[in-house]
Image (cartoon, coloured by chain):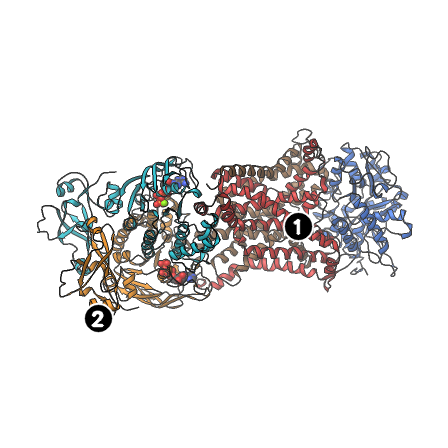
Chain colours: A brown, B red, C blue, D cyan, E orange
Amino acid sequence: MVESRAVRIALRIATALAVSFLYMPLVILAIYAFNPSRLLVWPPTGFTLGWFGEAAANPAVIRAVINSLLAGALATSIALVLGTLAAYAVQRYRFFGRESISFLLVLPIALPGVVTGIALRTTFTTFGVDFGLMTIVIGHATFCVVIVYNNVIARLRRLPRSPEEASADLGADAATTFRRITLPGMRTALLSGGLLAFALSFDEVIVTIFTAGPGTQTIPMWIYQAIGRPTELPVVNVVALVLVLLSVIPVWLAQRIAGGEAASLSR
Amino acid sequence: MTWLHPRRGLQLRLLLAGPIGWLGVVYLGALLILLLNAFWTKDSFTGRVEPFSWTLDAFDSLITVEVYRTIAIRTVVMAILVTATDALIAFPIAYYMARIASARTRGLLVIAVLMPLWAAYLAKVYAWRTIIQGKGPLEWVLAPFGIAGPGLDEIANTWLVLSYLWLPYMILPIYASLERIPGSLLEASSDLGARAGSTFRRVILPLAFPGVVAGSIFTFSLTLGDYITPDLVSDTKFIGNVIYDNSSLGSLPLAAAYSLLPVAIMIVYLLVARRLGAFESL
Amino acid sequence: GTGASPKPSLDMPSSIGEAEDELNLIIWAGYAERGEVDPAYDWVTPFETETGCKVNTTDMGSSAEGVQLMESGQYDGGSFSGNATDRLMASGTVAPVNVSLLSNYANVFEGLKNKAHNSKDGVAYGVPHGRGPNLLAYNTEVVTEAPTSWDPIWEGGSEYAGKISIYGYSDFIADAAIHLMETTPDLKITNPYQLNQAQFDAAVALLEAQRDNGAVYWASYSDQVSGFAAGDLVIGTTWQFQVNLLQAEGEPVEAVLPDEGSTGWSDTWMIHKDAAHPNCMYLWMNHMMSAEANGQATVWFGEAPTSPQACTYAETLSPGHCDLTHATDEAYYSKIWYWATPRADCADTDAATTCKDQAAWTEAWTSLTGS
Amino acid sequence: MPAIRLEGLVKHFGGEPGRRAPAGGGTAGGGVGGAAGGSPGGSAQNEAIVAVAGIDLEIVDGEFFSMLGPSGSGKTTTLRMIAGFERPTAGRIVLHGRDVTDLPPFERDVNTVFQDYALFPHMSVGENVAYGLMVRKVPRPEREVRVADALRMVRLEGYERRRPGQLSGGQRQRVALARALVNRPRVLLLDEPLGALDLKLREEMQIELKAIQQAVGITFIYVTHDQEEALTMSDRLAVFNRGRIEQLGTPADVYERPATRFVAGFVGTSNLLTGDSARAIIGSAGTFTVRPEKIHLVDPAATPGPDEASATGTIREVVYLGPDTRYIVALDAGGELVVTQQNLATSSMEALAAKGRVVRLTWKRQHNLPVGDG
Amino acid sequence: MPAIRLEGLVKHFGGEPGRRAPAGGGTAGGGVGGAAGGSPGGSAQNEAIVAVAGIDLEIVDGEFFSMLGPSGSGKTTTLRMIAGFERPTAGRIVLHGRDVTDLPPFERDVNTVFQDYALFPHMSVGENVAYGLMVRKVPRPEREVRVADALRMVRLEGYERRRPGQLSGGQRQRVALARALVNRPRVLLLDEPLGALDLKLREEMQIELKAIQQAVGITFIYVTHDQEEALTMSDRLAVFNRGRIEQLGTPADVYERPATRFVAGFVGTSNLLTGDSARAIIGSAGTFTVRPEKIHLVDPAATPGPDEASATGTIREVVYLGPDTRYIVALDAGGELVVTQQNLATSSMEALAAKGRVVRLTWKRQHNLPVGDG
Ligand SMILES: Nc1ncnc2c1ncn2[C@@H]1O[C@H](COP(=O)(O)OP(=O)(O)OP(=O)(O)O)[C@@H](O)[C@H]1O
Ligand SMILES: Nc1ncnc2c1ncn2[C@@H]1O[C@H](COP(=O)(O)OP(=O)(O)OP(=O)(O)O)[C@@H](O)[C@H]1O
Ligand SMILES: [Mg+2]
Ligand SMILES: [Mg+2]
């Protein structure tokens, strides 16, 4: 009740403008997806659903989607394991260098993707690692760890120790306690962290370009390549629109799971 | 498990082996190799780097060739501009979400902000490209006022699009830190005689600041490294473009040496941000 | 020197074995179509059906990227331009090709065999895909009279300032050099890719003037296409491909080869020395020289077919294609400087002369476009 | 002129679940009685909650006035309306003759001490205390003097530089107090200011708070759900229940003459005599209460005086409390009475030996208080 | 064989700031006394904290044993070492003759009721209570019977399906208790189990807890900082101060014969007579304490009996407490004594009118307790 009426109205307008700004390009994208012209000209010249059919029938798009899903799922799994372990260690133990760990974990996401990408590629080349899905996964997992880590550590901070102690007290050994008490307590954090990590991996393009091998084009790579080819633009419109629409699912899920918590970017 | 119980040191080592192994060895190792590359010679024709052939040539060109300095300054200025723009746009909406909107509206707004964040990055850049380019919607809107469209070669495009792309990264941490401010603090402030303006300046702003810094880590670092957006919506070169161009063409050692610049900037940035308590707001 | 350039092993396969199940290629976008854009242009699916080799492609954004991808060792081969083939051959990344195993090789125009960009010491290191010049495109509504020289893009204070479309890679320095060969013979430029300091400086100065005159650089060809379509660009360097696209959409765009000649490309399919699927790669190389595949591919991209048979087939898809691309006109192609890598040794045996190397070109280009 | 006059004050909280209402804790009066055996169902979430149901009250200048009541009875809401953090649904708030119902908090001459202290975490103790003066543009030299005075009053000299995070609970409490007092408000509102402190510290702070109030002469309005605290500290108190005042009076009024059964039970231990046993012992129907400390334990053979009520029974349980001993006596007429005896001369041994003994209880008839069912 | 024997138990917390220690609150014994007037300097952050400084103790089977002491005195740490959550720095813990010092919690036959209840939020009440049986692989039919029994004991039949979030504080307390009791441990540890409840509910639960302990006959070790609670409930109690036990004994021992000045002050109100006034009134030097409830207020002209000590003074302050009245008397010989009088027949009016009156205080000499300075 601190804000005056005028301030509140001004804020409401600012919010409305900011939200419109966020959505305006996406709306334009949607409009273009139904435009029959192969070249992008405004205003739209007609209406067609044809590009959707083309996109659905495009094997490169389908392969790319599958690759993205695979890479995302694998990177997320690795990130879930590593992020949880790190968060648990940092939150539940005292040790030398504890402060540096969060720093180390943020680094991959705070350093520019080009740097991470080149560093990884140079390393893989140096050690003769074959480029492929696994190299993409390694690249993605590196910056996904911190997302899981931040989600989990925020939860652990709020999660009291006492239920874990109670569990041990009631006769459960460490593994049982972790499985039955700690893990359920972190479940929503893991889910929202995992979703976020997955989304990030699914959307990552720069590191992917540097770590991809033959036959492992992901969907952002496909889009990037297709943007360079005017003949593909209508299909790009459709694919981009569908991706935007699909992103509702994880957002909605994360919101449902974690309530307001998903709001924290958690990284 | 009984034997493990008293051995907290061992428990800890088991827990940390994975994460530290991964990031400490794979990630830092990769960065180290990149660093080494900055000091190695490369073949001028085939472009291959010769390991352990030490030279400072890459640093030499970075220092002597003016354009690298110009680009570095341009990139940092752009990162500052984008960060400031996002902070200015993000604060009101974050404030509205955290303190004014009803619970329901707040939930909807959080989704509304998260969705573009999770929507494909390239799709968004591409959407802007279609908006900005000639015969696009922007030109169409501006035409009646007799203003020409910017076309795809204005540096301002980069500023606009990057600000757009990273906006949610700024809104969410600010929102989170605003939401964490107990209502009683604001009540106490007004109880003690502060009007809304003073309360905002003296209580809300200082307490939300770590959130702004947390958000700025993203806006800043993402701007610092992006080369795709500048490439797609303008023809201006940024640090990322130079690194990218040289990593394939030209000289990998030069790319590696140039990479050290954003790395150094971000490490300093992170250290400062951590001191300001921003890590809690990430 | 040219550094690590191991003597190529000359053991080539003496027969094509049984096809593997896969083939990983690095290509220029548009060099392996599956009829996704236009069902009439599909030369990958028949190949896959016939050989059982599943084709995976990765587009290269530039020759340099192609070299880098090739050096990762993950690909069986690819279609490279001259400024990639020379590096690949020098670094020993690619293997010589036993052309006697390729039944379609015999039909290929002699002008495309055993050239500097696709052979070494008389041994073939690949087979041709097609060739073409970089052309001068113009909007016929603005530039009403067809230009015959490159002058409109170089002239200071051109009436097209701000609407000049320029290829956005360092290779374009060579285009400046070609213009200098014509306008400043004193520089004694003999090869636009191998420039000594004075020649190089002159080329860069020319480019700076052009930049200040409002050049717009294109990195991906869709930039250029949308620019021409929108009227933001009216004249500039282009490939036949973009012109075809624009014309198909009804845009008033034409292209010419100016009298000075031009840079250009002559692309070659090469095989990696450790290719995981060599048989598929041999089959693919042969396939790409077949009348159908080569005809479709060269029409699709707007370049010259590599054999009379392909020419004939191409005519059925796009009447007049062979004339348009001067497929049989060796004189025409003698005016074309195919892309090559700038080298410190000037790519000659004369140890006394030194030229600016690729890194210098890249740096100059960064300075040109980055400041 | 009264310091504060509340006229027909009402506050409803809107249909949807509000920010401050914790899950499950939002049902009025659910706190105390609902602990055990309550029905497992819950109240509908979407009804409007009547937090304050109509309050009329005058508080005198310089008074130490307490609001006592169970959790959810509307004390905090009333206080927040006085401070200006909530707008009344109906009614008026008059501060020293001026209607402030519609004024924002920063224009009211009252200050609040919050239960969670609400100290500004990014400011030092000194800055916290100076805050009110600073935003009111009191010049720096005066500000410094007043801040030093306020910190001396709460015995925190030398703590100016510390951050709230570096203080103990009791110290934070003092800072919150100093921060309010430094503005010299005419009314100070305190919402369970000692709720977060532990017993010993709370007792210390009670004495200190009372002393400070007497020293500065400001009107204190003090919210608590601890009856002992309210009885000890207040000049007058109001007992809240379900958004209304059940009784208003001095501590003695409320303790010795509870107006309703609710007050009798909430303030002190209530020994209720009902139905048959009431008729048998007191001679009239109805519900009566008698305080445990008013009852004498005498020999069963003794005859009670004419002005005394009396009953016989057996000591079922003896609890040694240190200063007192509590006897739980099962009455022959039915029911139980709790009797408290000061351990004046008796030692614990004697006290504990009384278990199982047959006794007579006597008390002055005037201490039989009939209570309504309010 | 004692249920529990602690031998020379010591616990230090390492140099770096500890997990459980809130900033600033980590200094041993800093809680009560340090609240006001303490030096602003604070202790260096990096010294090791001595939480428990050497404890020897035997607790008998079936005993209700309390650990009483101010905040930070080491009670919780001692309890946590018994439960196995902390490893002693030195010393041994013997449970029923078995040295368990190095065993993890899940191998000790003790159970704990936590102050914050520590219920598993993702499990229903029934699942919470069944947890200990489940992880110990007790077969389902037996499990169900025992869970039902335990819930009946704490009067929560019919609540099996609820989630902890849907319960009130008192109900959660009961669930925590049932969850521990269902395992039939030989020792139950309770760390301020009623600390989070409000006054009325706490009193109810005290009675109930005691009744349950008597019913099941398990050894209870009960941590509290509320002296009244400790006195009321315990068979024996230990008074902790700065990581040591200051006194060990029955409630009456501790209350009536405090061994040290600290105990005298911490358990009950201590009226200390020192120096000159001690010599004048009692006739010998040293420090004495006399409990406020042992003192009679009589006419100043009255002559004290031969076995009585006596002093004259003026009533400086009268505090009406409801059941009692507290008089603060300024002695003519110097110093102050607090006198508590049960409001047996006196009304508040009479009591409050006493302010300023000159009175004589008398008390039995046997209630003069000399106290050490411990
Ligand atoms: N902002 C709010 N929104 C909805 N309901 C509220 C709000 N504030 C208070 N209430 C409800 O109003 C009623 C009175 O609350 P109030 O806080 O005034 O009680 P209280 O007497 O202070 O209790 P306690 O001793 O627990 O602090 C309660 O039922 C409470 O849940
Ligand atoms: N994990 C820990 N790390 C560091 N110091 C600790 C830790 N646990 C307890 N301490 C310190 O040890 C001392 C004793 O603490 P303990 O919790 O045992 O006290 P307590 O008597 O239970 O107090 P309270 O009544 O406040 O619960 C305190 O100074 C406390 O700050
Ligand atoms: Mg309240
Ligand atoms: Mg404790």
Mark 2 lies on residue: E284
x, y percent for residue C225: 75, 38
Q: Is residue D243 visible?
A: yes
- What is the C-alpha distance between the residues marked 1 and 2? 84 Å
Task: Between residue A193 and residue A264, name the one nearer to us.
Answer: A264
Badge 1 sits on which subunit?
B
Q: Indicate if the residue with disc 2 has its beta carbon within 8 Å of ligand 2.
A: no
x, y percent for residue E69: 32, 61
Numbered disc 2: secondary structure? loop
x, y percent for residue E24: 43, 60
Mark 1 lies on residue: B77
Q: Are marks 1 and 2 in contact (CB under 8 Å)?
A: no
Amino acid beneath label 2: Ser
Lateral position of residue B13 relative to residue A207, left or right:
left
The C terminus of chain D lies in quadrant:
top left
> How many discs appear?
2
Identify whether D146 is placed above or below C54. below
Dividing the picture into quadrants, the one containing residue A203 is: top right
For this orientation, the residue located farthest to the top is: A46
Lateral position of residue A28 relative to residue E153, left or right:
right
Amino acid beneath label 1: Val
x, y percent for residue B261: 67, 56
